[in-house]
Image: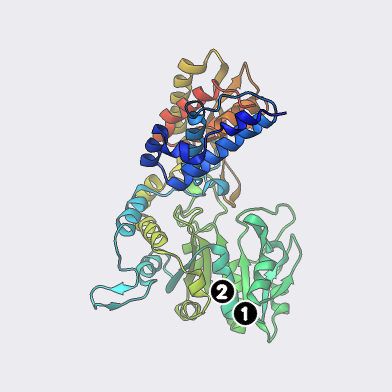
Amino acid sequence: MPDKKKLSRLPSVDECLKSAYGEEWLEKYYRKIIVRSIRETIASKRKELLEGADPDITIDAIAADIEKNIVKHSEFKFRPLINASGVVIHTNLGRSILSDTALENIMSTARSYSNLEYEIAKGKRGKRYAHIRDILVELTEAEDAVVVNNNAAAVLICLDTFAKDREVIVSRGELVEIGGSFRIPEVMKSSGALLREVGTTNKTHLLDYENAVCGNTGLLLKVHQSNYKISGFTQEVPVPDLVKVGKEFRIPVVSDLGSGCMISLMPYGVHDEPTVQEVIKEGADLVTFSGDKLLGGPQAGIIVGRKKLVQKIQKNPMMRAMRIDKMTFAALEATLMQYHDEEKALKNIPTLRMLTESGDIIKKRAKKIFNALKKSVSDKAVLEVQPDQSRAGGGSLPEADFPTFVVSIRPQNMTVNALEKNLRLGDPPVIARIKEDELLIDARTVQDREVKTLIGCIASAFEINKI
């Protein structure tokens, strides 16, 4: 049985708050968090007493535990981390890193009032999308453009605008599932459009589309295979051929590109990823794509194409529910501005830089990490710089492997899973990958500014045992 006298000697919340520790906490942290942390700590000590333990329950003794809880509850849950996985557009890790220019533009406009919906020259209310329209039209050579909060929303609003209660013809080989188990047929159903599948999984012919057209056809939808590939005995109908059918029957052709590539990646070994500009030139009436994949900007769904169709989308009442906020505008405009100089875009937009960075630069970064680790953990692990493969990720370039260099770490006094967990639970967390009995640190996705911090995190991970 627990000692009731000891239970009664547990300090109260008020006593803790009025102590010297409490006064110090109240100067640094929020009162609600302090009270919550005190209650949690007292409850923990009460449980220990009830279980027969004999902990020191003075305020001096429990102050450290209270402060530990305060710090834990005061931390932001949304945190930066180091991506050492080699997956460049990592959906779980926030996809594309924003460029310095984009971050500066967010800061300068978000910390002040802005002309989000205000025409400064005329001194009256303006249109939200005017800020971004001109640059998108210039870069893509489309007639008009509008932006919503992600590419799924872009596809959804196109369907809702032009094909509600009407049929949308799609190849069976293009009925994709995107992240989070969202599927094209389900997006279509939500829009009120009626799915009309044509062809087979591996082969669809132009005649399949022509035979499916009827008086209730609202759209011809072409979905780019951005997150998967069908190989072997295959055939698909290219955009120019679909455009001919669309013109013959006066039906809009929408091309969902998904990844949003604006610069040809052929010089870097990627030969089957069309650019937005190419698809516009092929005659697609509307093209939808993401802002946070290969474009390298913030999460957004971009729609470019014929002016008459874009203006109709803008009048759709759903636009208000899908519109982007001022910080997304700031980041997207700053990202797009950098595309005026392709060479600078490849260098300054992190996603493009990481995807196109030379093996020599990556190897140099890997050796820098390796040399630093030799000084701190060489007695605890076998280290080696090895060639390996990185991936684009984020539902982009599914078959493209990017040669990279990794630092392999084979721990000697703990399991590789224990090391991975220690890194993941560190501050900041480090996300690496395991290959057999080695932990791999892929230098492609480690930023130069993170190297010193990464070395410290790895060294600390060998000093703790959380498993």
Tag 1 and tag 2, C-beta contact below 8 Å: yes
SS at mark 1?
A: helix
Residue 302 to residue 169: above or below: above
**Label 1 Cα crowd, 10 Å radius (few <14 / some 14-19 / many 20+):** many
Q: Position of residue 390 (x, y in %)?
A: 56, 38
**Label 2 Cα crowd, 10 Å radius (few <14 / some 14-19 / many 20+):** many
Q: Nearer the viewer, residue 333 or 48?
A: 48
* Quadrant housing residue 127: bottom left
Residue 169 visible somewhere in the drawing: yes
Instruction: Count the labels in the image.
Output: 2
Q: Residue furthest bottom?
A: 215
Q: Which residue is mark 2?
A: 158
What residue sits 48% from the left and 49% below the top? 96
Q: Position of residue 113 (x, y in %)?
A: 29, 64
Q: Position of residue 95 (x, y in %)?
A: 52, 49
Q: Residue furthest front?
A: 5
Query: What type is the residue that disc 2 sits on?
Result: Cys
The type of colouring in the image is: rainbow
Query: What type is the residue that disc 1 sits on?
Result: Ala
Residue 447 is left or right of residue 56, and the answer is left
SS at mark 2?
A: helix
Residue 75 visible somewhere in the drawing: no
- Give residue 163's mark: 1
User: Does label 1 or label 2 sit earlier along the sequence?
Assistant: 2
Residue 403 is left or right of residue 110, and the answer is right
Residue 168 to residue 42: above or below: below
What residue sits 54% from the left and 68% below the top? 154
